[in-house]
Amino acid sequence: MSDRVKIRIENATKVFNVYKRDAGTESTRPLKASKMERMHLFAVKNVNLTVKRGEVVLVIGPSGSGKSTLLRCINRLERLTSGRICIDDLCVTDPKADIRKVREEVGMVFQSFNLFPHLTALRNIALAPIVVKGMVKEMAYEKARGLLKRVDLEDKENSHPAQLSGGQQQRVAIARALAMDPHIMLFDEPTSALDPEMIKEVLDVMLALAKEGMTMMVVSHEMGFAKAAAHRIIFMDEGEIIEEGPPDTIFNNAQQERTRRFLKHIL
Ligand code: ADP
Ligand code: MG
């Protein structure tokens, strides 16, 4: 891991406006706007974090603690309400930031694979290089074949997503993200939708990426992966980073009561 900062997150805050019923209105009939109360929900609250080049940061925390929102703000699927996120010199929160450049820089893998159902594995992977980068088709397919090999699916290039297992689909999704040659990979609970016997094959691909020096932010509660690959664990609760440190320290010697309480559920 180099000392160079790759991702710099400064005072990041993301507020959603949510509408809640006034207390005391128990009607199940459609509510008038006047009966709805607008609330500011701080999904991410004043987060400061730097990630070094080649670092693997694991983000843990209860459901609703802002993990996905934080990742989504890094690749600009969401816009921060205030604060700043920069990748090298590219500040993704700058209103003038080139979103295409951001998406080239940052690959993302979701819990629910999100492959295009009507395209083969090969075409799923080759699509973005062709459409976004203007790569010549045959070159994009060659590259996609190389990526399929890397995720151990070289015999599946003509399979459609429905013909693949969950673990295979997720590996195609990883290959698809890698097709843009990103410098950063974000993983949002990549194994949560998988049957237990398929989790390892996906984690193995992620572990190999980590070993190759990819800068990664991973939301996951897979402790085996945490111990094998993570340089740092971030614990989030209610939109805030409560505690961070090396895996060994966080798992065995967490300083905050909230962290310890959460870890009891997952360890
Ligand atoms: P996590 O990934 O840790 O489970 P999320 O980042 O998905 O948490 O959500 C953080 C909070 O923001 C939750 O309270 C969630 O309901 C809320 N939230 C997330 N996305 C939206 C949205 N698009 N609109 C309104 N509220 C949202
Ligand atoms: Mg989430």
Image: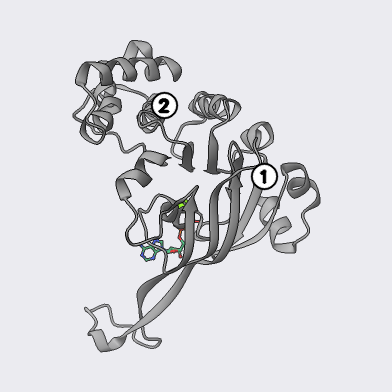
Q: Which of 173 and 161 is in front in this view?
A: 173
Residue 219 marker: none
Horizontal placement of 152 versus 145: left or right?
right
The image shows residue 247 at horizontal and vertical percentages of 72, 43
Q: Can residue 107 be seen in this view?
A: no
**Image point 48% across, 62% down: which residue?**
84
Which residue does the image show at 64% across and 33% down from the upper left?
A: 229
x 54%, y 39%: residue: 216
Whole-number angstrom distance, CA of label 2 to CA of label 1: 24 Å
Outermost top residue? 155
> Whereabouts is ligand 1, in terms of quadrant?
bottom left
Q: Tell me if residue 148 can be seen.
A: yes
Q: How many marks?
A: 2
The residue under the point 22% across, 16% down is 138
Residue 99 location (% of width, % of height): 32, 50
Q: Splitting the image into 4 quarters, where does residue 10 fall?
A: bottom right
Q: Mark 1 points at which residue?
A: 232
Q: Is mark 2 on a helix, strand or loop?
A: helix
- Extreme residue toward the right, this view: 253
* Left or right of 63 on screen, residue 252: right
Quadrant where the image shows the C terminus:
top right
Q: The residue under label 2 is which amino acid type?
A: Arg
